[in-house]
Amino acid sequence: MRIARIECRLHRTGFRHAAGAASTGGNLGLRGMETLLVRVETEDGLHGWGEGFGFSLARTTQDAVERLVAPACIGQDSRDIDGIGRMLRRRLHNYGRNGPVTFGISAIDIALWDIAGRRAGRPLHALLGRAARGRVPAYASLLRYGVAEDVARNAAEAVRRGYRAIKLHEIDPDCILAARRAAPGLPLMLDINCAWDDPEDAIRFCDSVAPLGIRWVEEPTWPPEALDGMARVRAAARCPIAAGENLGGVEDFRRLFAAGAVDVAQPSATKHGGVSALVAVAALARDAGCAVVPHSPYFGPGLLATLHVLAAAEAEQPIEVYFADLDHPPYGTALAVRDGCMDLPAGPGLGLEPS
């Protein structure tokens, strides 16, 4: 039952903007997609897969896993998921409680939950709750294009592919209006990536887009941990506020709720502590009366773990799908969105093996 081996694998692939956008790399300036896969094996031969937050950080997270996180895990009882998480957070806290080390800890947690499901012979969602949805609705998380024609083209393509909601990473009013015209009637979310230093600027922005039927405005203010400013925006703005992906973990979400700063919380499986963190944040959100729609613009075990958590949740919420077509997705076409939904795999644990 003890952890015997931990191995990192960097899955690299090219990708295409879904519908021929003229811009390159979106708001992250990406030229390719890297997914950090972490394989944990126990002494009795079981294994599970995890994922630490990647994009341009994948190799830094890999270094954190290989030099710091993995050595601390060898010999630990794989069944003690909470205990291993606490041990790692305490032992490695001097390296920061937000960043590549935490992303590596998240990967271990996901892999251990995968092992727990495989050992029990049950899919992960069956260990987490009773909802047992076979499908989860999906929303398309578009890159930032900055060109109204590209935004309209990709929004229309998302509609054609059956997505039931669309998120933009735009602050240009012309781009936002172009998406609304291309996707009439669909929920439209705006991630503005902490665009405003002054909460009053964020309030004015929120009020300007509210007539377009915006489901939420995400991370309106900089820095993301300035919760008082975000709470001011939420109190005054005419549309709901979402946030959380750039916080440092469960304790930061506790402060987020206490500040009354959000309507929608967005914990990340690959950033905040894996499956265990998603479950813990959901419990805090329930007490605070907030919705939970996890951050999940990735392609590996983190996306799959998020899918299982949403399948088990009492209230149905959509899964975020990064709107970029990979040349070689880690799971092939198994997690493709069909008729606006992502299907749950039937196998034990996460239910799929990455290629």
Image (cartoon, helix red, strand yellow):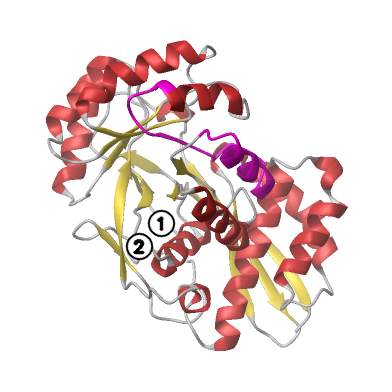
Report the disc number at residue 335: 2
Q: In which quarter of the image is residue 136?
A: bottom left
Residue 333 image position (x, y, % from top left): 32, 63
Marks 2 and 1 close (CB-CB < 8 Å): yes
Helix, strand or loop at disc 2?
loop
For the residues labelled 2 and 1, the Cα–Cα distance comes to 9 Å
Report the disc number at residue 329: 1
Residue occupying image coordinates x 57% and y 87%: 120
Q: In which quarter of the image is residue 113?
A: bottom right
Judge left or right: residue 312 versus residue 189: right
Residue occupying image coordinates x 43% and y 17%: 202
Helix, strand or loop at disc 1?
loop
Residue 236 image position (x, y, % from top left): 41, 21
The amino acid type found where label 2 is placed reads Leu
Q: Classify the position of the N terminus by image quarter.
A: bottom right
User: Start and end of the magenta stretch?
Assistant: 236-261
Confirm whether residue 29 shows in the render. Answer: no
Viewer-nearest residue: 50 or 314: 314
Residue 20 image position (x, y, % from top left): 24, 33
